[in-house]
Image (cartoon, rainbow, N blue to C red):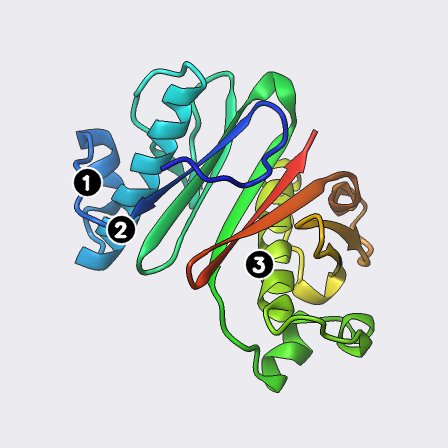
Amino acid sequence: MELGLQAPAGAVVFAATVDDYPLPPEEALCVEDAGEQRQRQFASGRHAARAALRRLGGAGQPIVREGRRPCWPAGFIGSISHTDTLAVAAVAAKSSGRSIGIDIERIRRLKPALHRKVLTEEERRRPWRDPREGVVAFSAKEAGYKAVNPLTDAFIPFREAEVELDWKRSAFRLRYLGRHEPNRLLNDGVGTFGFIGNEVVTLFFLG
């Protein structure tokens, strides 16, 4: 299903319920040693990704991986994420931007110990207007990292990124606080978020 997320121009976001979707042989090799649930999640993410690619006029060729990253067909950028029940994929034409990252998380209250690991001191001082804000911030940082990492090949700790949520517009911006200059790409992107039942989906786009 195509999501009603406010995706940037040229990007398409699809979701698929985690299920036993068929995999072409090249993709099946990527998860041949994985457990049954992991194979279902992988297949569901690829199913959503192919749907997004078709929506943009792309062919249905296999989406294998290099390390943990999907290898997208020439001319496209994309990202995949999943929970135990839902997989999401975001795809865009390479001509429309440099990179894209998507993340999906179950909505839950972040425990105080996780707050200290995920949120900066400034973020923890802010008043919470909605009980979902903590997990939205967590997911936004994941989406930002997934967009920047393919370009910089560098890790971004949670507390080296700060989120500014615009709850009315379902949008967010990220600010990089660390010292690794290439990761300052995080400052250039735009993000959006939305909800599917008990899950939040965040999208971060570097134009």
Tell whether 4 sits left or right of 183: left
Which quadrant is the C terminus positioned in?
top right
| Dot 3: element | helix
The answer to whether residue 145 is above or below residue 207 is below
Tell whether 198 sits left or right of 92: left
Question: Is residue 35 visible in this depiction of the protein?
Answer: no
Residue 99: x %, y % from top left: 61, 33
Q: Nearer the viewer, residue 89 or 108?
A: 108
Q: Residue furthest front?
A: 168
Residue labelled with disc 3 = 139
Residue labelled with disc 1 = 21
Residue 170: x %, y % from top left: 66, 50
Q: Amino acid at mark 1?
A: Tyr
| Dot 2: element | loop
Q: Are marks 1 and 2 in contact (CB under 8 Å)?
A: no
Q: Residue at x 70, y 48 (%)?
A: 169
Q: Amino acid at mark 3?
A: Ser
The answer to whether residue 204 is above or below residue 119 is above
Quote the CA–CA distance across marks 3 and 1. 26 Å
Q: Residue at x 59, y 50 (%)?
A: 193
Q: Nearer the viewer, residue 186 or 169?
A: 169
- Does label 2 or label 3 sit earlier along the sequence? 2
Residue 103, labelled with which disc?
A: none
Q: Nearer the viewer, residue 114 or 105?
A: 105
Residue labelled with disc 2 = 18
